[in-house]
Amino acid sequence: MRNTGTQKKTTKGRRWLAGVLAAALALGLAACGGPGEGTAAGSSEAGSTEAGSTAAGSSEAGSAAASGEGAKEMRFGSTGYFAAETLDPANGWDGWYMTFDGALETLFKLDENMEPEPALALSCESSDYITWTLKLREDVTFQSGAPMTGEAVKACLERTYETSVRAQEQIALASIEAEGQTLTIRLQGENVTLMSDLTDPLWSVYDTENSDYATAVYGTGPYRITEFEPFVETVVVKYEGYWGGEPKLDSARLITISDTEALSMALQNGEIDMAVAMPTSAISLFENNPAFVVDAVTTSRGSRMYYNMQRPAMQDPAVRQAIAMCLDREGIAQSIYHGMATPSYGIFPDFLSYGGTEGLVLTVDGYDPEGAAQVLAEAGWADTNGNGILDKDGVELSLRAITFASRKELSQVLELLQAELLGIGIDLKVDVMENTADVQNSGDFDLDCETGVMVPTGNAQYFFNMMAVTGGSSNYSYYSNPELDSLAGTLAVTADEGERDSLIRQMVQMLLDDNALTVFNHQKMVNIYSSAVSGYATHPSEYYLLDVHTDIQR
């Protein structure tokens, strides 16, 4: 719903964007590829605002704060990190985006060591890992002005659980009770990592009583969303009633920019103050310039190749192994990722206690196209009709690979792989698209090149439940291993860290043995921003961006 004031504010935002366009900033729909698992945001209309609409509840005072004379506004740009589809925190990965915006917060948050610490909740205790007692802060209000009570948090968590399949994968809720500022959460079974799980922005706390998710959502964060144009721009203004102190900025704009070149130009020209998740190819433009800060932190983000085992050719383990052997991990890390990625032959990065490859048996331990050709020949693949493409039992190795446009490095990896595979008799067609979700859901692909944070809460259970267990929502290999499924269940009820690490490494070994998917590198999160920015440091979880401390000198 728009009134005259809203239309004026939206027009002003578009005039600003037009200026950016004039400077070669081509704004448009971009696949998200940021949080989560790299899947491009879908095109569902459910909960979407009309393009250019202003979130309900944006008062004229809020508008003045955003655009008034002397107001301090900061502008963020990214090719994929602000691609929210809706204003519903329980929809897909939209809760992550609204956490970046400074609009939403969780009961607990992660520190620099990826350990959970109090946020909206002060404590989390259990004697049996099934029934948990949480004490909530008493000084928090939603951006609607309503108090954050136990009943309000209960309603929020229940709604998220009912709405999101991913929430059900993470935490098996049985019931939630509220008494004052005390929550009692009962689970369907033991879960030793509940506090870590609740740091996921999917479990953000928002006001279910007053939010409609089409024009407004009210969180507890330092900034309130006032304008929202899906995949284009979000505008936030500071929330005066924020429990954590007064935000430093009056407003912020978070803008989706279509490509790396436009993003770099916008930062160089001062049209944005920070480029979030800057593609590595642009780093050299800024790294020796005192006007900018290149802030790079190793995270658990993994670049990976899924093998769709519902497709005839991909059901052959020799084909999956051969493809993995043709990925020049070291060359990719240096040439495509410009040294801002570490080659991987395992699953998890080695800074994690269960990460790295030490003690594991590797089915692939280097770049070896000649060995890959031999593996295929031994498995019975041959060019029987002389067309240069291998075949077996009537199945030809002509494959379709998909990836999304907003992560340029991924398409470059596929182009390199395409040439490598052709050399051993595999025809690979590469489709780069704005939105991969529909194709993923249809299963009409053989390879899916993705990137995503693999253990964002510090808990490896997240990765296994979503990407490796049978039926996981991001298990795009359609991999199924009953033994791994069983170990994942055991991991969920194992509290001892040493035992957990042992279980995780057993499951990693299974994935490597089966070549269920290939994690070919672990990336650094690179944010580049003006030296005028203060109160900010890139976080290894990739969860946090705009907060109460973020500031800029104008």
Image (tube, grey):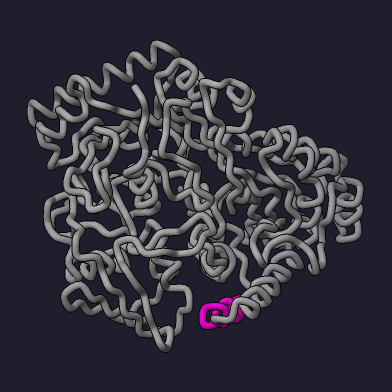
Residue at image coords 59%, 66%: 468
The residue drawn where x is 80% and y is 46% is: 326
Residue range corresponding to the magenta coloring = 482-494
Depth check: give the residue in front, 28 or 455: 455
Q: Per the image, is 522 magenta?
A: no
| Side (left or right) of 530 relative to 315 | left
226 vs 540, left or right, is left
For the stretch drawn in magenta, the main secondary structure is: helix
Q: Is residue 473 above or below residue 288?
A: below
Residue 129 lies left or right of residue 120; in this view the side is right
Q: Name above or below for residue 53 compared with residue 189.
A: above
Tell me what residue is drawn at x 87 percent, y 59 percent.
380
| Residue 147 percent across, percent down from the top left | 14, 60
Rendered location of residue 316, percent (x, y): 75, 61
The answer to whether residue 513 is seen in the rendering is yes
Q: Is residue 268 above or below residue 495?
A: above
- Which residue is farthest top? 22
Residue 484 drawn at (x, y percent):
63, 76
The residue located at (79%, 57%) in the rendering is: 321
Can the viewer see residue 447? no
- Quarter the C terminus occupies: top left
